[in-house]
Image (tube, rainbow, N blue to C red):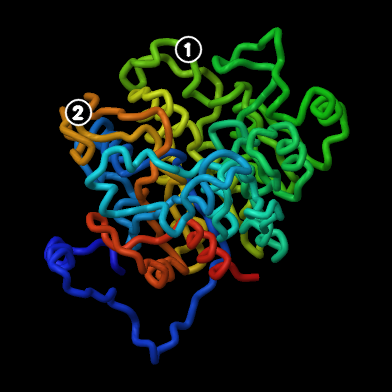
Amino acid sequence: MIKSISVLLITILFFGCEIDKPKLSLNVKKKERKAKNIIIMIADGCGYNHIEATNYYTNGELNSQVYESFPVIFPVCTSPAISGKFKSEKGLNWQNGYNSGLTYSDSLWRTLSPTGSGAAATAIASGRKTYNASIGMDIYFQPLKSIAEKAKELGKSAGLVTTVPFAHATPASFAAHNVHRDNYEEIAREMIKSNMDIIFGCGHPDYDDDGIKTEAPDYQYVGGKEFWGKFTSGKNYDRRLITKQSEFEKLLLNPTNEKLLGLPLVHTTLQAGRGGDVNAVPNKVPFVKAIPNLKLLTKTALSSLNQNPKGFFLMVEGGAVDWSAHSNYSGRMIEELNSFNKAVESVVKWIETNSSWDETLLIVTSDHETGYLTGLNGFNSNISSKGKGKLPNMMWNSKQHTNVLIPLYAKGVGSDLFDDYADELDSLRGYFIQNSEIGQIMFRTIVK
């Protein structure tokens, strides 16, 4: 597998020599292996430097995550089909939305025309790039079939897990179709009524971000007050509601074929939005008690989805990595990415114990970079370590998304296909793929 390109090749390229990406012989047709199960894990807003910062703090060294040793590693271009404001003709399209030369020579370029989470997640879920703010819709406002919906068509199970409201852009793009990501009530209603087997995420209307019952319920993430009232009073669309950590733990040991809505007793995030000093080092502010973490939610989802002998699709999102990066909260970002990393470790262990790499494809990636995170010595500088347990030398340069390449790691059946799609060259990170090609590979890999 091609993971990167050597400094020698980059040097030759800059001196004008043409370089062709090594490919399989055109006379040999690969026999593609198909996946029974597909799991994609998305650390929302996570770039290369977010991973480095978390590695330095938690382990004191780079390349210390299980996915960083996966056999397939590629950069990903996140540019949308159309950027800019909703229904605006302005904005770069994906064909010229990423420029390798300007990325490393012009600090402002990285902030221009970035993707939104809706466009990015829709591209990943459907294999088609679209406009910013889209939820499962193409540039002509027509619905796009997601890989989760395709899995259901094939008789498989499908699940979505997130650390932020389940109706937010990333999970929504796998199960809903709406012209704008901010139509939370409409999106939540569609998702709850959908045929997704598992929906685990935040958004409980009766609790705040510290897990305290509120006197002013907020129903926007659960379909509105009237809809939620009907859902909780019996008209639940054949979907059982679970909220307590003990219920998730019980379900882990006693899986079910029921359709589930898992809604922990917090409002917008599992932990990232809790009170206390938001600028504190990781883990200093006490966590909200009796709230399931992403690892438990993921393992519980896998336990029930695996009841289907035909297999399943599962999307797991570390959504509050992005939220913390938007706020430039270094400690909270590291907490959230560390939680995501532990969930990835649990999935790898699950595959090796309950399935195999011959029947399951695991993809670990992001949807875009948030916060323009760098080292202290300019926009091309690397983050440097101060030692394990200490915040590294790092600097936020924005509170918004950027258009830089983000990482992808893959292992298992079908992961070799990524090499077929990596045909564009970045001067630093080597050959890269488009985010829509992640979806194309999943559609190509899934089997009935």
Q: In the rendered view, does 165 fall on the left or right side of 33?
A: right
Q: Residue at x 79, y 43 (%)?
A: 193
> Where does label 1 land, which residue?
275
Q: Is residue 100 above or below residue 431?
A: above
40 relative position to 138: left or right: left
Residue pictured at 37% horizontal, 69% vertical: 419
Tag 2: amino acid? Asn
- Between discs 1 and 2, the one toward the N terminus: 1
**In this rendering, the label closer to the viewer, 1 or 2:** 2
* Residue hosting label 2: 393
Vertical placement of residue 238 versus 229, above or below:
below
Confirm whether residue 236 shows in the render. Answer: yes
The amino acid type, in three-letter code, at marker 1 is Gly
Q: Position of residue 187 (x, y in %)?
A: 71, 38
Taking depth in this image into account, of 366 and 266 the one nearest to the observer is 366
Residue at the bottom extreme of this rendering: 27
SS of the residue under disc 1:
loop
Circle 2: element type: loop
312, 204: nearer the viewer: 204
Kindly report the distance in space between the C-alpha atoms of the residues bearing marks 1 and 2: 25 Å
Mark 2, other Cα within 10 Å: few <14 / some 14–19 / many ≥20: some
